[in-house]
Image (cartoon, coloured by chain):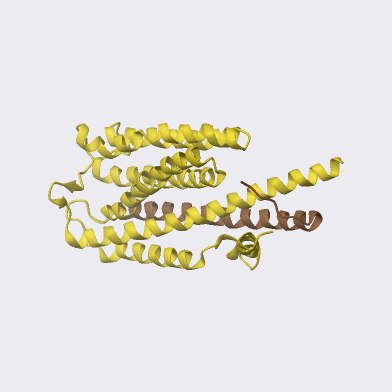
Amino acid sequence: MSGLGYLATGFGVVWFFLACYLFWIGHKQRALLARMKRLEKELGQTPDID
Amino acid sequence: MEPSRQRSLGGWRDYGRGKWGLPAIAPTPGLGALAALAMIFATIAALWWAPTEKTMGDVQRLFYFHMPSAWIALGPAFTCVFGFSIAYLAKRSLKWDRYAAAAAEIGVIFTTITLITGPLWAKPVWGVYWTWEPRLTTTLILWFIYVGYLLLRWVAPPGHKRARLVAVYGIVGWIDVPIVFLAIWLWRTVHPRLLGSGGFNIDPAMLRVLLLCLGAFTLLFLYLLFVRVRMMETSARLDALTAAHEEGEGR
C-alpha cells in the first residue's frame, strides 16, 4: 500500500468510528426516550435519579 | 415539583422528537454544529492546507488526527475521569459518576483511534506497524486500564457501591497518564519529541494546522461528553421509572 493508501485508511477509520458512535448514541437515546415516555404516561410521574 | 426541576425535565424530554435521530443526540445543538464544522475544517486543513513533509510525504498528514486523538484521551478525557471520580467521592453525587463514565468511554474511543492511526503512520515510515517501545507500550496499557474501567461498570450493578468502586479505579488508573506523556523523555524511544525547550519543534504552517485540529477535537470531545451524559441520565431515569412500575404492579 502506498503512503496515500495509509493516509486514506487512517482518516477513513477516524470518521467511520466517530460516525458509528454518534449513530449509536442517537439511536439508543431515541429508544430510551420512547420507553420512558410510555412509562411516564402509565405512571404519571418523573423520577429523581440522584 | 419545584420550578427549576420542571424546566430541566422539560428540556430533556424534548430531545426525542424529529427525524433521523438528530434531536435525540443534540442537547447542545450549537456546540454540535460548531464541533462538526470544526472537524470538517480540520480534515480539509490536514489533507490540503498543511505542507507536505519532506521525508515522510503525505502519510505524515495522519499526524494531524493522531496527535489530537492522543491529546483528547490523555488530556481532557482520562484526566476528567480522574477529576470527576474525586468529585464523586467528595460529593457522593451520581452526576459525577455519570460524567466520569462518559469521559472514560470517549477516552477509550480516542485511544483506539490513536492506536489505529499510529501504526498506519508507522508502517511506511518505520517499516513496522508496531514496536514495543515505551510510548506505544504505555498507551496500550492505558487502553487496557480504561477498557477494564468500562467492563467493571458493565458487570457491577448500578448504584453508589459501583460508583465508589469505579471512582477508586479511575483515580488509580490515571497514574499511567503522566507515564505515557513522559515516556519519550524518560526512556529511549523512536517516537518524535514535539515539545522541546524552545516550544514546538515543527514548522509554523504545520503548527497552525495542528492547533486547528486540537481545537476541533476538543470541541468534539465536549459535545460527545454532553450527549453521552444526557443519555446516561435518561437511562437512569428509565431504570427508576421501571422500578416504580414494577413496584406498582407488585402491590
Q: Position of residue A3 (x, y in %)?
A: 29, 52
Q: Residue at x 60, y 51 (%)?
A: B233
Residue lying at the far front of the rendered structure: B2
**Quarter residue B1 falls in:** bottom right
Q: Position of residue B59 (x, y in %)?
A: 28, 53
Q: Which chain is yellow?
A: B
Frontmost residue, B71 versus B192: B71
Whole-percent x and y of residue B209?
Answer: 27, 61
Tell me: residue B204, above or below residue B125: below
Q: Position of residue B219 (x, y in %)?
A: 40, 59
Q: Is residue B117 left or right of residue A20?
A: left
Foreground: B114 or B225?
Answer: B225
Q: How many marks?
A: 0
Q: Residue at x 42, y 40 (%)?
A: B82
Whether residue B25 is visible: yes
> Looking at the image, is B19 positioned above or below residue A26?
below
Residue appearing at x 69%, y 51% in the figure: A47
Q: Residue lying farthest left? A: B198
- Please, which residue is most extreme toward the right here? B251
Q: Is residue B126 left or right of residue B166?
A: left
Give the brown chain's letter: A
In front: B101, or B220? B101
Q: Quadrant of residue B218?
A: bottom left
Q: Is any part of residue A1 visible from this angle? A: no
